[in-house]
Amino acid sequence: MSTERTDRTDAPVASNFIRNVIDEDNRNRKWAGRVETRFPPEPNGYLHVGHAKSICLNFGVARDYDGVCHLRFDDTNPEKESMEYADSIIEAVTWLGYSWEKSGQSHLYFASDYYEQLYHFAEILIERGKAYVDSQSADEMRANRGSLTEPGRPSPYRDRTPAENLDLFRRMRAGEFAEGEHVLRAKIDMASPNFNMRDPVIYRIRFAHHYRTGDTWCVYPMYDYAHCISDAIEGITHSLCTLEFEDHRPLYDWVLDQLAQAGHFKRPLPQQIEFARLNVTYAITSKRKLLQLVTEKHVEGWDDPRMPTIVGLRRRGFTPGSIQLFCDRIGVSKADSWIDMGVLEQSLRDDLDAVAPRAIAVLDPLKLIIDNFPDDAEEACTAPVHPHHPERGSRAFPLTRELWIEREDFNEHPPKGYFRLFPGNKVRLRYGFVVECTGFDKDEHGKVTAVHCNYFADSKSGTEGSNNYKVKGNIHWVSAKHAYAAEVRVYDRLFNEPQPDAGGRDFLTALNPNSKRVAQAYLEPGAAQMNAEDRVQFERHGYFVADRYDSQPGKPVFNRIVSLKDSWGR
Ligand code: ATP
Ligand code: MG
């Protein structure tokens, strides 16, 4: 059994305001038809479902306009970054189905490769009187920043000459000063209503080891300075980012405009466009909080199947196609909102329904004994691999005297409307015979240990005689003799509150204590041969995947991806 890799690249994509901007630029020949986007993660953690939205948007736009999307590591914070994180990001983007290659050229970049250029441009700003070394303490800078109603106060160092600034900045780079002794600030407007324009810091001193540049540098550029220049160096046309950067845009434009005036970048300059970030209910998308779940062991790692990280979604069993479909469905807008987790889960169902093979699994086994079935007889039964694709053939599994059925399919005291097994009632064993319940066994605690029945030899599914039996219940089963024992990890949502961290609440109090249940299940024989990451629909139970790491042919371990129907409803 195997699952075909699903691929959604042919799905029609709804237009959105970003595509409208690109269409307009193309009409005006602004970029001569060129579309270059970038996905710029900081390698300080694992990517999550929110990043998937940005990836699908950036790479999707590039694909649809025959452009290219760069993968750029925005690695200008030496303390928190690592190659382990960078590698995991490369793997996640690749798994999602995207590539940063075009015409044989790779567009994988690191902002840390631009350190020399970024430094050089800072000297140019200094020479042109557009940046200065400030020697105020952090507290003084804060105190002089002003407020919403009050302009900021200029630093007493604001009027240093370019020569003085250049000398200090070079000595900052040379390591002559301690952290915090000086910073380099852009000289813009201390009275601007936009705080980001009140002479923002663009370089600070950090004696920190960087995972790529080692100890070469002790001055590091700030995000707002490094990001726009990285975009311009790479020739990005449309720089798509989340809404919180909206009031950083004037600074983005200011830096590039200064360098263009100095003759370093040709116009048009890259354009920053903001979109709403993705929030998914019953999940957390803050890297810091995800890290806390891992370090405090509330989950079993970054790739715990309950984590909204891409490695977690992958291990849970989500397909790249289902995540692309989800991103297409939620679209792109300018207004922040919450998307229901059910939308993500439904995308998985819709992606897998047409392709996942079917199989039977009994997750909470109870013995059913057919007393009038000969001891060593076997009756071959068959079922379609996929109900809507007869060309995919059928699966075979034998029916024997002793079977495993779901415990919930028997009820000693059936409530009204219960059509499954109870003494005196008839049900059909799916793909097999009609049986009539004759009794049951109990242990000394009153727990039902086995159910007894008789079968009707002329009632087999698919034969003439089967029409003579009208029963309301249809239950699934596996032969006790031929079934494969398997571990099945039944996952549910990690939180039982739609907005676990709303209103400053401690999100740990919203953890769902029942988010993982391990069942010792029995599977129909063929399911034992599934390979890691093969997906299947266990009839009645939902979609499952053979665990990426723990499952082996002959010794399968399955994760439940989602149930067949949304039980969380709203
Ligand atoms: P940090 O707080 O570490 O900056 P971050 O989530 O912003 O965390 P980045 O690595 O900077 O992480 O993100 C890379 C890109 O992904 C950015 O362009 C960012 O805007 C985008 N992104 C991050 N979170 C979301 C989200 N929830 N929805 C959509 N895009 C997101
Ligand atoms: Mg960020």
Image (tube, rainbow, N blue to C red):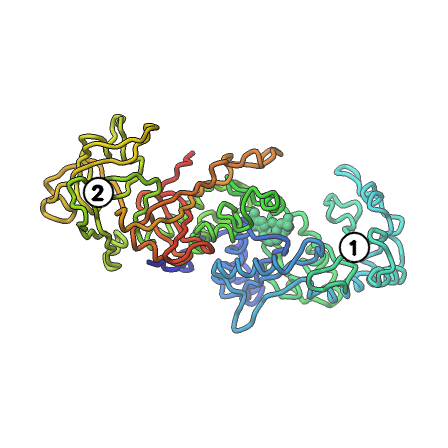
* Residue at horizontal 80 percent and vertical 40 percent from the top: 146
Q: Quadrant of the N terminus?
A: bottom left
> Can the viewer see residue 392?
yes
**Residue 32 vs residue 527: left or right?**
right
**Residue 458 in the image: x percent, y percent?**
10, 44
Q: Quadrant of the C terminus?
A: top left
Residue placed under numbered mark 2 in the picture: 429
Note whether 424 is above or below 129 in the view shown: above
Mark 1 Cα-neighbour bin, 10 Å: few <14, some 14–19, many ≥20: many
Q: Is mark 2 within 8 Å of ligand 1?
A: no
**Residue 82 in the image: x percent, y percent?**
65, 58
From the viewer's side, name the closer residue of 138 and 489. 489
From the viewer's side, name the closer residue of 77 and 535. 535
Residue 520 found in image quarter: top left
Which amino acid lies under the numbered mark 1 shown in the image of this protein?
Arg
* Residue at horizontal 14 percent and vertical 37 percent from the top: 470
From the viewer's side, name the closer residue of 421 and 335. 421
Instruction: Single out the residue that lies furthest toward the front.
Output: 444
